[in-house]
Amino acid sequence: MHDNCAPIPAAAARRPVFVGVDVGGTSIKIGLVDDDGRTISRTQIATNESRGPQDAVERTHAGINAELAASGLEWDEIAAVGLGTPGSMDIPRGLILEPPNMPHWRNFPLRDALATLCGKPVAFANDANAAAYGEFWIGSGRDFSSMVMVTLGTGVGGGIILDGVSLDGEHSFGSELGHVMIDQRADARLCVWGGGRGQLEAYASASAVVARAGEAMDEGAATSARERIAAGESLSPLMLAEEAEKGDAFSEQIILETAEHLSVGVVNVVHTVDPGIVIIGGAMNFGGHAWAIGRKFMAHLKAEFKKRAYGVVQETPIEYASLGSNAGYLGAAGIARAASHRSN
């Protein structure tokens, strides 16, 4: 993980300071970040989704105040706040529209509610776009002027940064790479959210990996994962990665097939925007570089990408993300920094 995630003393921070807020379905991460992208202080609070967005905004503001006090910083040292949220949104109007799994957060002016309490400009972004910007600013993409990030989790998210600008799109739906079409057949897989047929998310998300593996096991596939399921564990990508590490051929096959599906989506976006680098992030990385199966997954993804990509972009680097779960608040702060610098 990049050393920008290790907090530094406020005295060593380069001013101005930015606040990054990363809203998730279960928790909200808050970080104070200096102008070089170094974390001064960070905390995490429960989202308490059922209590609604206004309650969460008020507790977020209280959390920022607590971090400022603990760090010895004042509000006048804060230039701007960055806010990343999941789901559909209207970025120009600052509205969170219909985030999945957050039914009490519908059509709410989240940006302005936070700006009112903080008394600072708030830059609003999709959570995956924010995470991508974090990797672009100080993570695996920091040496490039443009990049694509694909996040593999319960669903598949994405972020596209072109010449330093996050691609939000006309309807605040830009960079939704999980909805790239990779299979046009009438019987193509359906996304677990009940959405599009044949989309990348239906093949390469954690939900899809579990569904594909479960279907193969129902058809009699031999795997050591059966023993763990029989003992009461739930089938998961982590379980498959652990079994693949122990030599289970079935688990490895499912993971490498996931790399093949992902390669089609990556080729589509590389052929569209020609980025300097593609970064693979999210919670489902099969152990990343630290595990043999994670290294096999990446090697297979690169090989399948090269097999399908047009000649001049075949050597586009593909790497794992480096900021982990901190990418969201760091990227939100980075987007606020970029907006602040543009306005000055």
Image: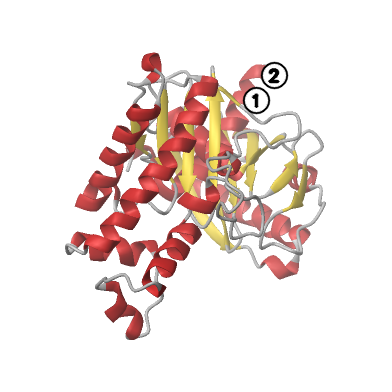
Question: What secondary structure is marked by label 2?
Answer: helix
Note whether 189 is above or below 229 in the view shown.
above
Q: Count up the numbered dots.
A: 2
Q: Residues within 10 Å of mark 2 (few under 14, many from 20)?
A: few
Which residue shows up at 78% across the image and 33% down it? 92
Quarter-of-image position of residue 218: bottom left
Q: Quadrant location of the N terminus?
A: top left
Which residue, as the protein is rendered here, is positioned at the far left? 247
Q: Amino acid at mark 2?
A: Ser
Based on the displayed image, in which of its 4 quarters is residue 234 positioned?
A: bottom left
Residue 150 makes an appearance in the image: yes
**Label disc, if present, on residue 76 of the rendered structure:** none
Query: Can you identify the residue that label 1 sits on?
Result: 339
The answer to whether residue 260 is left or right of residue 103 is left
Pick the front one: 118 or 283? 283
- In the displayed image of the protein, which residue is found farthest to the top? 312
User: Residue placed at 65% from the left, 50% from the top?
Assistant: 196
Q: Residue at x 20, y 60 (%)?
A: 245
In the rendered structure, which amino acid carries the disc numbered 1?
Ala
Label 2–label 1 contact, CB within 8 A? yes
Which quarter of the figure has residue 305? top left
Task: State how far apart marks 2 and 1 are (Cα).
Answer: 6 Å
Residue at image mark 2: 343
Q: Does residue 110 appear left or right of residue 168 in this picture?
A: right
Residue 204 is situated, as x and y percent measured from the top left of the image, at: 46, 50
- Residue visible at 72% across and 70% down? 50
* Residue 166 % position (x, y): 59, 28
Can you give x and y, in whole percent of width and height, for residue 331 in the image?
53, 37
* 163 shown above or below 91: above
Closer to the camera in the image, 227 or 218: 218
